[in-house]
Amino acid sequence: MQFQLDPELYSRLFAEVFLYLRLHQPVQPWQAVVIYPSRNVDPGLHRHYQVLLNSEQVTRVYLDEWAQPRQTVMQRVMGVLLAEPHQAIAEAQAVLAQKEDGGRVPNIVDLVETILAYKLPMLNREVIQKMLELTDADLKQSRFYQDVLAEGRQEGRQEEGVLLILRLLQRRCGDLTPTVREQIARLSLPQLEALGEALLEFRGLADLEQWLATHSQE
């Protein structure tokens, strides 16, 4: 993935490819894929690497071209990623308008929300969710949320469960203080699972702190 113009990209890429081949000597042939947002970020053919760049072993993908026309769900997701900030919400709404068995596509909800959170840092998660008309049912179906609960239920995965819950809370409540992080790290697996269910109702850090004050001693 290369989203900034870098004249030295191909010299680094091929140096790393051939160093890997020298050190590991893999049996299978090598291939490289370079993904750009558009052609104007591609430094272009290089006199030393032109033969490689034109070979079948190297593929260059330009997302803005690949995403046209917006026919598949993933092409629409790329539209959200590549859109100007003022157009991103409309692109996101078009993605989530796609239905699967009468409901939203579960694995896409979290991805679209995450893209918008990075593209529109001035908006908090709650505002983005309202603009996208996301319900609690939509959020509970997202892969990220399901992964949090699944990891938290697995015996012996306490640390991973804590990390996943912290990631979800950061998305819901913003930056967490060291004290709050320490309290969450001390929760048992059943408590982590309960927190994973409860956090969808949180409106901010104050709700989380209140929940911890009530449940951390149970």
Image (cartoon, grey):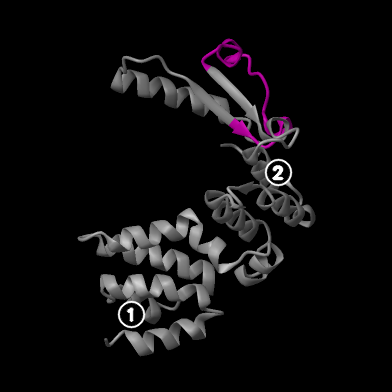
| Viewport quadrant of the N terminus | top right
The picture places residue 90, in percent across and down from the top left corner, at 76, 54
Kind of residue indicated by mark 1? Gln
Q: Name the side, left or right, on which 88 lies relative to 103.
A: right
Outermost residue, left side:
156
Label 2 neighbour load within 10 Å: few <14, some 14-19, many 20+? many
97 over 59 or under it: above or below: below
Q: Is residue 186 above or below residue 68?
A: below
- Give x and y (percent) for residue 12: 50, 28
- Residue sticking out furthest to the front: 102
Hey, what amino acid is under mark 2? Answer: Gly
| Residue at 33% across, 85% down | 215
Q: Circle 1 — which element?
A: helix
Q: Relative to 56, is 130 on the left or the right?
A: right
First in sequence: mark 1 vs mark 2: 2
From which residue to which does the magenta span run?
35-57
Residue carrying label 1: 183
Q: Quadrant of residue 218?
A: bottom left
Q: Secondary structure at mark 2?
A: helix
Identify which residue, 162 or 200, lies in the foreground: 200
Q: Find residue 59 and report its image quarter.
A: top right
Residue 151 in view here: yes
* Residue 6 among those drawn in magenta: no
Residue 188 falls left or right of residue 137: left
Within 10 Å of disc 1 (Cα), the crowding (few <14, some 14-19, many 20+) is few
How far apart, in angstroms, are the residues tagged by discs 1 and 2? Answer: 40 Å
Majority secondary structure of the magenta segment?
A: loop
Circle 2 sits on which residue? 79
In percent of the image, x 64 and y 34: which residue is there? 36
Q: Percent from the top left, x then y, of residue 13?
A: 50, 27
Res 175 seen here: no
